[in-house]
Image (cartoon, rainbow, N blue to C red):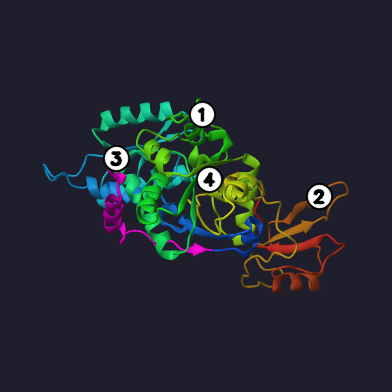
Amino acid sequence: MCSQYCISLADVKKAHSNIEDLVHITPILTSSILNQLAGRKLFFKCELFQKTGSFKIRGALNAIQGLTFSPSDGKKPKAVVTHSSGNHGQALSYAAKLKGIPAYIVVPRTAPSCKKSAIQGYGATIIDCEPSDESRTTVAARIVKQTEGTMVHPNQCPAVMAGQGTIALEVLEQVPAVDALVVPVGGGGMISGIAVTVKALRPEVKVYAAEPCNADDCFQSKLKGELTPNPSPPVTIADGVKSSIGPNTWPIIRDLVDEVFTVTEDEIKHATQLVWERMKLLIEPTAAVGVAAVLGERFRKVVPAAQAICVVLSGGNVDLTSLRWLKQPEGPPRSQKWPRSPAPTPGSSRPAVCWEYRGEARKRRKPQWKIISSLDFTGSRLPGCLLTTIFSTDICKIRKEDVLSAVSEEPPAP
């Protein structure tokens, strides 16, 4: 059945053999709260626990395994090149590093900084591009020419697609009674590999795609019956699915994917928060697209019978700097304990820092901290009994006129 496509079940099984010693068999987790919300049993394939933080390492490793040595001359490729919103770039950088191959990653300038940092951390070179399919393709082609490298497409490369299909082999073994899989879709590499595998082994199991309304090229393509790329760069919090499906993934999606569900930005945000809070899993918004889909009203109507549904949580590379509450701490709480150090006697030459807490001013929410002294306590106007208390505790609980709060050798973090 699958011989008409660029990959087959045999390719997926070969990929599994190539990478099984290099990747994790990621767990399946469940949540009673999400089961109640969905009205059925949900199984979550946790690819956020995979190496490099996403499913992308499966395809990258399989591709690098095939490129490591050329049958004709026995030499490694001079370099590997790809374009990526972040996760495939990390995966290819890691895989190439294992084989000692230089990697060049073309990354949209709007990609999360945490993903760019991780790519560089694996030793790859980053080249910025505009956040559009055209810019990514053009810049990557230029880098291939300059480096004489080999292009490893993030979702249209058959070896990559086959590698991603190994997810389905694990799911079918871990959840034998599964009725359907829900997979987030961008370029379509993962869902294509999964669909080929599932329909070859368990044709009765449904495969559903999920994507943002703001990047609904897969939905539009299925609706119109022809490949319909996004007309302009999508604007969505789910940065991992901004790319459009392509010529290799479209035929598989057209024939083997049973339905495509779209979700709004608010639904993605809500699903992300829900998984963080209820499952304690730090998924990225892209991974929440499938969760949002199964919790949506349209899914209930279109898929009323399926009772065991596996949702692929595609990754967990979260840009923590985007979380407002992490950006700027307001100052140490009153109960915060700073590192204990040997206590000097009052009047010694050892310097210390005494901090004054003035309390919360009226009409202000933030406490006001003020340094009293950065010298030693010789000649301090504070009474000796209070100094003794200061030197014997991390946090001084005795206040003078309700202003003295804490003492430390180091000031609080700004």
Q: In terms of sequence position, does the residue under pointer 4 or pointer 3 come before the other?
A: 3
How far apart are the two marked residues, 1 and 3, measured between alpha carbons? 31 Å
- The answer to whether residue 14 is above or below residue 79 is below
**Residue 8 in magenta?**
yes
Q: Residues within 10 Å of mark 2 (few under 14, many from 20)?
A: few
Q: In terms of sequence position, does the residue under pointer 4 or pointer 2 come before the other?
A: 4
Query: Disc 2 designates what residue?
Result: 365
How far apart are the two marked residues, 1 and 2, measured between alpha carbons? 41 Å
Which-is-in-front pick, marks 1 and 3? Answer: 3
Residue 227, x across and y down, in percent: 43, 30
Residue type for callout 2: Arg
- The answer to whether residue 268 is above or below residue 22 is above
Secondary-structure class at tag 3: helix
Query: Disc 1 designates what residue?
Result: 233
Secondary-structure class at tag 2: loop
How far apart are the two marked residues, 1 and 4, measured between alpha carbons? 16 Å
Q: Is there any visible trace of residue 143 in the rendered image?
A: yes
Residue 286 is marked as 4
Query: Disc 3 designates what residue?
Result: 4
How far apart are the two marked residues, 4 and 3, measured between alpha carbons? 30 Å
**Residue 285 in magenta?**
no
Q: In terms of sequence position, does the residue under pointer 1 or pointer 3 come before the other?
A: 3
The residue lying furthest to the left in this view is: 73
Segment tinted magenta in the rendering = 1-29
Left or right placement of residue 241 versus residue 77 in this view: right
Left or right placement of residue 54 versus residue 140 in this view: right
